[in-house]
């Protein structure tokens, strides 16, 4: 299953307060870029993940987020999917460590 236009629109809208984002479809999913840096991915199942490490990865894991395979991507918490301010705060924390 590949991500659809509605999934892409949701993800880019959720993080729109970051500024101009670019996307690239790959392997049925999509990567999201801010200033040329991959900070998130949308899996082919439509699940959104942030590229995190360290304390933020532990925080997300402790909160119930799932890891994308064995890669440094952790699912965006459900409450952040409904709150663009919270999602962008997490994305900014992500970008600060990349």
Image: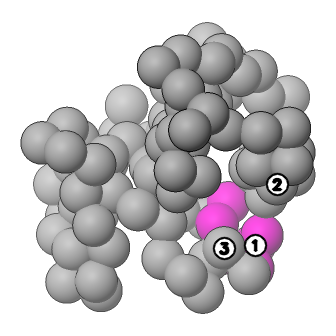
The residue at which mark 2 appears reads as 10
Q: Are marks 2 and 1 in contact (CB under 8 Å)?
A: no
Disc 3 on helix, strand or loop? helix
Q: Who's the residue at 62% across and 77% down the image?
A: 80
Q: Which residues are magenta?
A: 83-88
Q: Viewed as shown, does residue 23 lie left or right of 45?
A: right
Q: Which mark is residue 75?
A: none
Residue 81 in sight from this viewpoint: yes
Residue 26 in the image: state x and y as whole percent: 53, 16
Mark 2 to mark 3 CA distance (whole Å): 9 Å
By secondary structure, the bulk of the magenta-drawn segment is best described as helix
| Disc 3 packing (10 Å; few <14; some 14–19; many ≥20) | some
Q: Say whether disc 2 or disc 3 marks the residue closer to the N-terminus.
A: 2
The residue at which mark 3 appears reads as 81
Residue 27 in the image: state x and y as whole percent: 47, 19
Residue 82 in the image: state x and y as whole percent: 74, 81
Q: Say whether disc 2 or disc 1 marks the residue closer to the N-terminus.
A: 2
Which tag is nearer the camera, tag 1 or tag 3?
3
């Amino acid at each position: 299953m590949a991500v659809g236009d509605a999934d892409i629109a949701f993800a880019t809208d959720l993080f729109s307060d970051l500024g101009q984002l670019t996307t690239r479809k790959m392997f049925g999913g999509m990567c999201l870029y801010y200033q040329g840096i991959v900070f998130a991915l949308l899996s082919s199942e439509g699940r959104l993940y942030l590229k995190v490490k360290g304390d933020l990865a532990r925080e997300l894991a402790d909160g119930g987020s799932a890891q994308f395979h064995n890669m440094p991507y952790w699912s965006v918490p459900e409450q952040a999917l409904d709150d663009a301010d919270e999602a962008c705060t997490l994305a900014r924390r992500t970008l600060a460590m990349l």
